[in-house]
Amino acid sequence: MSLYSELRRRNVFKVASLYVIAGLLLIWFTWVARTQFGLPFWAEEFVTVLVIVGFPVAIIFAWVYEVTPTGLKKAVDVDQTQSIVFKTGQKLNAAIMVTVGLAIVAMVADRLLPDLAVPPPPEPEPEPTVTDVADAALGGAVPEEIMSWTMANGLRVLVWPDEDIPNVAMYNFVRAGGRNEYPGITGIAHYFEHMMFNGTSRLEPGEFDRIMEANGGANNAYTSNDVTVYQDWFPRTALEVIFGLEGDRFANLAFDDELIESERDVVFSERRSRVDDNNLGKLFEQMVATAYVAHPYQFPVLGWPSDIVNWTREDLEAFYRTYYAPNNLTLVVAGDVSAAEIFQLTQNYFGPIPPQDPPPPVRTVEPPQEGERRLVIETDAQTPLLHIAFHGFRAADPETLAMELLLKVLVDGNSSRLHRRLVEDDELAISIDGFQQQGFDPGLVYVYLTLPAGTDPAAAEAAVFDELAALIADGVSDAELTKAKNILLADFWRDLATIDGKAEALGTFEVFHGGFERLFERPAAVDALGADALRQVAERVFQRRNATIGVLRARAGDES
């Protein structure tokens, strides 16, 4: 007899069909009861699982006791007169009735007792987007495409989209410079400018530059009294690669003893070439150390030689943890990017970096200078140098802009006052130039001259102060003021024409001037300045009691 005939004879198909029909009816009844009478949400699922599990159990019983030799033998041994399937069906029916009864009791209890149902899991919170964290729109002259935000770990991010070319400029401002040092660790901020290119726990020394260049990018960095700035320029296609490199070195810088000593030698060599063997740098270093008697601006950014030799690994690790924390950084991105993608990249590559305690504040305030200071350096020199420095203002001070215009009048170009007087008319100098230090604390207004061999520096000094006295007495002419404004504004707009200029200007105003929005107030501020404002600033700064005067000349008896 075939298996099919045997299963049919023993009513296996009938029992299975009845079970399926009964199961479907029970599921339908439960659904009706749940929707019409408010049964708990789990009732239908409970019955469905029960029916699904029960069916294969019934089939297994039928197979074992009605078809397999072992099952048939057992039926003969116990004088089986009824189908095992039938009996199994009876037992299953009884079990189902008991289970249904228990379910009814549970449903009644569910009605009478407090809600015992497990609540559905809460909906996951949506991932934040750039619009969730972005600063409020500033309006006014600020381009609407610029966005800024502060991440949870304190990292400040500015984005200026510019799709003119498929390139990107990235600037990372670290608030760590010479002003954050003290005797014993001077020059350490500049040292980190070098160390940040020399490997991490993931990349070997040199890999940063190799990967950068392989992706079409270039980089540089500089250290000042106030900040260390890391600059990257690269094609848009390398955006994520560069973010990966930057996030890695700001989180995982390697401190290998051999590498530390190697880079120490490199920094010492840079000091020799830029200061010890460079008369301009040598005089400038001594001028700054003389002009400041209290404030840490007196320390050379390159560091004193004995400090470079004696930094310890512990000094370096402590400085890195303190100053290279995300809450001490401002990241600026300009170019062919969107704020949304920069937000996601900063979340991915800078977001995991934990913040640190804020660096200790610089509390020292330089006391007012109450008298002229002088210094003379005698060394190997073919031409004498004359430097004159005055204490000036902070970058954020309103007087700083007026001083910028004054320096345009005094030393910018061949038609400037000091150039005409000292270089062309009196022939007391070969060249003359100047600049204004703009930092967190009041910096120096600095004028420097290269003199012809054999010239008496006193004559050039007298001519400079003569012109400054005339400026204080008479102010600037309308023509000079207009010219100075035109030069300053032309430089301003020229810089903003490039993505590099955008990134640098945006970051500089954010870090030093109290907010990047002030960048876009600059043209109006320049237009508003009058000649009298410049004269008042000149009178305040260009006084001999506020001056430090330095001369570098050949040693007595040396041939000029």
Image (spheres, rainbow, N blue to C red):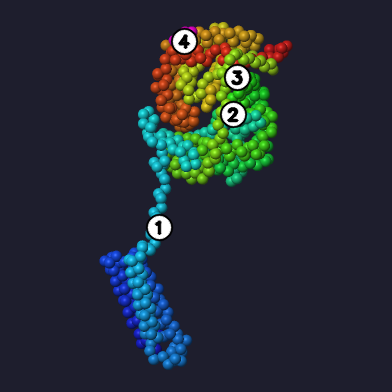
Mark 4 in CB contact with mark 3 (< 8 angstroms): no
The magenta-colored residue range is: 473-477
Badge 3 element: helix
Q: Label 4, on which residue?
A: 475
The span from disc 4 to disc 1 (Cα, nearest Å) is: 75 Å
The spot of residue 168 in percent (x, y) is: 47, 36
Mark in the foreground, 4 or 1:
1
Comes first in the chain, label 2 or label 3: 2
Q: Is 547 or 201 nearer to us in this picture?
A: 547
Left or right: 493 as drawn, with respect to 41: right
Mark 4 in CB contact with mark 2 (< 8 angstroms): no
Mark 4 in CB contact with mark 1 (< 8 angstroms): no
Which class describes the residues within 10 Å of circle 4: few (<14), some (14-19), or many (20+)?
many
Residue at 44% over, 30% down: 516
The span from disc 2 to disc 1 (Cα, nearest Å) is: 54 Å
Placement of the N terminus among the 4 image quadrants: bottom left
Comes first in the chain, label 4 or label 2: 2
Up the image or down, 189 lies above or below 534; here it is below
